Image (cartoon, rainbow, N blue to C red):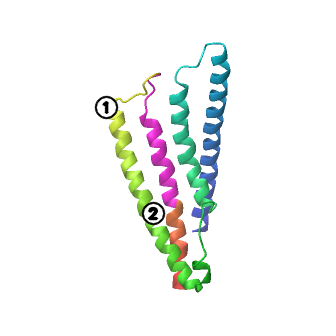
Amino acid sequence: MLRLEKQLDNLSNAFNWVAAGAILIMMALTCADVVLRLFRHPIPGTYEIVGLMGTVGVSFALAYTTAKKGHIAVEFLTSRMPKKAQAIVAAAGELFSVLLFGIIVWQSALYALDLKRTGEVSLTIEMPVYPFVFSITIGCLLVCLILAADLYKSLKRIKG
């Protein structure tokens, strides 16, 4: 299990770098567009590209944040519980999260395949949209795997 956790951690780190690159592209493109607007030559499709890059940035950073336990957790009540009860609450939350992200993976994959089948493109620059929806699928799949590994650890803590 330790080897799998290490691989998931490495993969989430790589995804985080891709997310950082997407955010860098968003920032550079926005700045360039603002400057070029001063000379009346805006970059066509900036709004679309920034929005599409935002899907990559958010969905790929989600896995890293999940792996590093960077989400907000209110432990006011659970911190006062016995260790076994804390593990049960954690396992229940992780199970619910795995199910939720599993549904997101499934539905976003179906949506991306539908967008690909219909040939949906962005309005201004006519860029295909489905690869960006697949990025949501891939990012959430990694989150699902990380949560499943956490669930496994919580179940082991419950057993003993």
How far is disc 1 from disc 2 in space, using C-alphas? 30 Å
The percent coordinates of residue 8 (x first, y second) are: 58, 58
Kindly identify the residue that appears in the image at 58 percent across and 59 percent down: 66
Report helix, strand or loop for mark 1: helix
Q: Residue 58 lies in magenta, yes or no? A: no
The percent coordinates of residue 111 (x first, y second) are: 36, 42
Name the disc covering residue 98, or none.
2
Against 98, is 105 above or below?
above
Report helix, strand or loop for mark 2: helix
In front of the other: 45 or 98? 45
Counting residues from the start of the chain, the first of labels 1 and 2 encountered is: 2
The percent coordinates of residue 115 (x first, y second) are: 35, 35
Against 148, is 113 above or below?
above
Against 46, is 23 above or below?
below
Q: Which residue position holds label 1? A: 118
- Looking at the rendering, the stretch of residues picked out in magenta corresponds to 125-145
Q: Do labels 1 and 2 touch, CB within 8 Å?
A: no
- Judge from the rendering whether residue 128 lies leftward or rightward of residue 21; answer left or right: left
The percent coordinates of residue 35 (x first, y second) are: 68, 21
Bin the neighbour count of mark 1 within 10 Å (Cα to Cα): few under 14, some 14-19, many 20 and up.
Answer: few
The three-letter code of the residue at mark 1 reads Thr
Quadrant containing the C terminus is: bottom right
The three-letter code of the residue at mark 2 reads Val
Can residue 7 be spotted in the picture? Answer: no
Q: Quadrant of residue 65?
A: bottom right
Bin the neighbour count of mark 2 within 10 Å (Cα to Cα): few under 14, some 14-19, many 20 and up.
Answer: many
Query: Which residue is outermost to the top?
Result: 40
Q: Quadrant of residue 87?
A: bottom right
Can residue 28 be spotted in the picture? Answer: yes
